[in-house]
Image (spheres, helix red, strand yellow):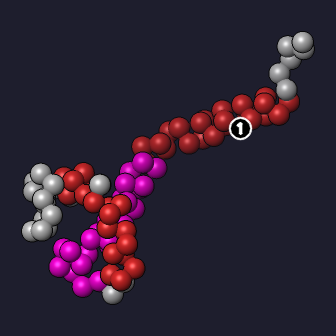
Amino acid sequence: MNDTPQPRSRLSQVAVGLREFYSGPYRRTFARARQDEDDLFMVIVMAEALGVPNPVSYYTVELLPVVYEQFHDWHRRMGLDRSPLDHFSCC
């Protein structure tokens, strides 16, 4: 029946507020950096299909089903109107 907030919840609210205060202005920069990392990852995984020799293709072939879902957005961001792969058409 006590209406005062618990110290732990107040501390977590302060932590959330401070995190928002410090990372808020850089949210766009963080999102762009993450997008660049995701694009590089996509190139590494799709390198063999794009015709670039990939020494780790044995390991990246397992990631292809996960990457295919994001392939359309990726090739549009890279400035390609159509899929660069002959055997995979997403548009």
Q: Return the residue nearer the eye: 91 or 8.
A: 91
Q: Which residues are magenta?
A: 30-54
Is residue 4 positioned above or below 24 on the image?
above
Q: Is residue 66 magenta?
A: no
| Residue 24 appears left or right of 89 | right
Residue drawn at 12 percent across, 51 percent down = 91
Residue drawn at 37 percent across, 72 percent down = 62
Residue drawn at 60 percent across, 41 percent down = 22
| Residue 75 appears left or right of 39 | left
Judged by its main secondary structure, the magenta piece is: helix
Regarding residue 10, the answer to whether it shows in the image is: yes
For mark 1, give the secondary structure: helix
The answer to which quarter of the image holds residue 16 is top right
The answer to which quarter of the image holds residue 35 is bottom left
Q: Tell me residue 10's x, y (percent).
A: 79, 29
Q: Return the residue nearer the eye: 8 or 59.
A: 59
Residue drawn at 20 percent across, 57 percent down = 75
Q: Tell me residue 86's x, y (percent).
A: 9, 68
Is residue 85 positioned above or below 18 on the image?
below
Q: Is residue 41 magenta?
A: yes
**Is the residue marked by circle 1 packed among few (<14), some (14-19), or many (20+) residues within 10 Å?**
few
Regarding residue 40, the answer to whether it shows in the image is: no
Image quarter (top left, top right, bottom left or bottom right) of the N terminus = top right
Q: Of the residues shown, which amino acid type is indicated by label 1?
A: Ala
Q: Tell me residue 63's x, y (percent).
A: 37, 68
Residue annotated with mark 1? 15
Q: Tell me residue 8's x, y (percent).
A: 82, 34
Q: Return the residue nearer the eye: 73 or 13.
A: 73
Is residue 82 positioned above or below 56 on the image?
above
Marks counted in the figure total: 1
